[in-house]
Amino acid sequence: MTHIVFSSSPNPGRSQPASNSTPRWSGPRAKKTFIEWGALGVSLAVSFTAAGIGGWLTSKSLATWYPGLAKPSWNPPDWIFGPVWTLLYTMMAVAAWLVWLSRRSQPVRLPLGLYVVQLVLNVLWSALFFAFQSPGAAVGEIVVLWLAIAATYFSFLRVNRAAGVLIAPYWAWVSFATALNFAIWRLN
């Protein structure tokens, strides 16, 4: 009778050193990698939770109140906001993750705290502008949001240059949104 033995060992029947018998995807390095990638998932979840809450606060007014507002001629078409915000929230999440990855070599509590503050302020802006239909209150709040993003940008830049670069488009978009919010408030 013939027996077929399947083995991953180059020399079946001979014992292998412990280091060769351990799969590549286990051990301290694999655990570190898993934690790092898991942290990216958490960062994306936090970012898109804020986006989801903001979207929920915005949704009702988009169909009823917002279309009736007077807007400046340079107001972007409505369809552009979804893709832009999706890209920005993704970039913000990756930026926060890059800062978190630097935690062993840089202090990251303040930069990540500022990041969370600006996310909360971002959601608050959606509540003021859309849910409470108050462009005037939203103008005051978006200035505070803009300052929080500025602080986040500079603190991220000090920890990880790429993280600062990833936050910059968000700061630019909110700068534009500040001017747009002000114009809508003045026109209405």
Image (tube, rainbow, N blue to C red):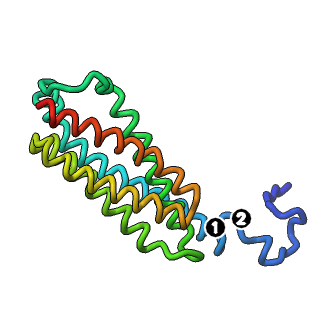
Q: Secondary structure at mark 2?
A: loop
Q: CA distance from mark 2 to mark 1?
A: 8 Å
* Direction right: furthest residue: 11
Q: Give how far across and how far down residue 169 sits, in percent.
A: 46, 44
Q: Amino acid at mark 1?
A: Ala
Residue at (31, 47) in percent of width and height: 51
Residue pointed to by mark 1:
30
The crowd level at tag 1 (other Cα within 10 Å; few <14, some 14-19, many 20+) is few
Residue 19, can we see it? Answer: yes
Labelled pair 2, 1 in contact (Cβ < 8 Å): yes
**Image mark for residue 160:** none
The crowd level at tag 2 (other Cα within 10 Å; few <14, some 14-19, many 20+) is few
Q: Give how far across and how far down residue 75 sits, in percent.
A: 29, 27
Q: Earlier in the sequence, mark 2 or mark 1?
A: 2
Q: Quadrant of the C terminus?
A: top left
Q: Amino acid at mark 2?
A: Arg
Nearer-the-camera pick, 159 or 63: 159
Q: Is residue 7 left or right of residue 143?
A: right
**Image mark for residue 24:** 2
Quarter occupied by residue 27:
bottom right
As drawn, 112 above or below 186: below
As drawn, 110 above or below 47: below
Q: Is residue 99 left or right of residue 177?
A: right
